[in-house]
Amino acid sequence: MISDNRSTVRRVLFITLLLNLVVMGIKITVGFLTGSLSLFADALHSVTDSLNNVLGLLAIKFASPYPDRDHPYGHQKFEAVVALGIAACLGIACFEILQGAVVRVIEGLQKGLTPLSIGATELWILLIVLGINIFVTFYERREGVRVGSAILVADAQHTMSDVWVTITVIAGLVGAWWGNQINFPLLRWLDVLLSFPVAILVFRSGWSVLQDNLPWLVDEMAIDPEVIQKLTLEVPGVINCHSISSRGIVGRQIFIEMHLIVNTQDVSTAHAITEAVEQKLEERFPPARILIHVEPPDYISDAVTY
């Protein structure tokens, strides 16, 4: 059974792109007005959000689940490739944030930090930005899980890191604003120092995306062979199964292969048993493509997997 979710993914990515462009514009504007390093770092993160949406829209054009002559297993790994691109963008953003923070610390120690021009208006605007990011995160993740899209789930993870980044930035700006109010210059360092945990949060998000998608690209086992064997043995007419292998990601696309020992010498009956096994596995792990090699009842093998 083939599941084509591209129209839904395309719609969600387009909506997310528009919202990310709004967020990016607000952050850049407020960053110029306040001179906040952490806010500029956050704006850079939002730039990568928008670029990821564009990459996702391009990938969806090619990530067809339908096989063709040159790609008999479909094209869905394009989604995983783009997800790895998102992880790379997060890594670059992490490096840029750390570099900017280190430079700002060195300059601050040598010349002193420039006071931030932050007021209640800018803080309220950033709270609105935070609300938009939270909406985008939950909306995109919900749709990604519902339709089994690697791109949407990875991009939602990216946007979730943006939520934490924005929360950290607001905390730093509140500290800097309060420092200006009570004339306590040390609080101005909060904006710079919080750039470091921001970078760690960004890196953590990228690592999570990498862990979610590498197994698909390297054909790691998707389902324990013992689980497949247990389900298969529940089908009447099955004596045993062995040499079981699986790859893909459950809920996204699964490929299963096995050797099946059936209690019949009749080809038509053996065919009916294999179809019953395929139906049972497809119902348990949709969408799935299953290849079964049938063997006679006197065949013996204890090798569940390779």
Image (cartoon, rainbow, N blue to C red):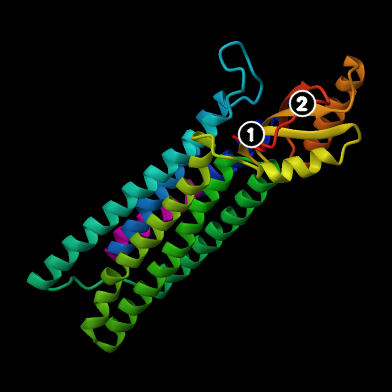
Question: Where in the figure is residue 302, as x and y percent of width and height?
Answer: 69, 37
Question: Where in the figure is residue 79, as x and y percent of width and height?
Answer: 54, 34
Q: Nearer the viewer, residue 76 or 268?
A: 268
Residue under the point 38% across and 44% down: 89
Residue numbers of the magenta segment:
20-36
Q: Secondary structure at mark 1?
A: strand
Q: Secondary structure at mark 2?
A: loop
Residue 51 visible here: no
How would you classify the magenta stretch by its main secondary structure? helix
Q: To which quarter of the image does residue 168 belong?
A: bottom left
Instruction: Indicate whether 214 appears above or below 258.
Output: below
Q: Which mark is residue 97?
A: none
Specify the farthest residue to the left: 110
Instruction: Say whether residue 253 is magenta.
Output: no
Rounded to the nearest angstrom, the CA distance separating label 2 from label 1 is 19 Å
Q: Which mark is residue 299?
A: 2
Query: Identity of the amino acid at label 1?
Result: Ser
Q: Which mark is residue 245?
A: 1
Ranked by sequence position, the earlier of labels 2 and 1 is 1
Instruction: Say whether residue 21 is magenta.
Output: yes
Question: Where in the figure is residue 207, as x and y percent of width and height?
Answer: 42, 52
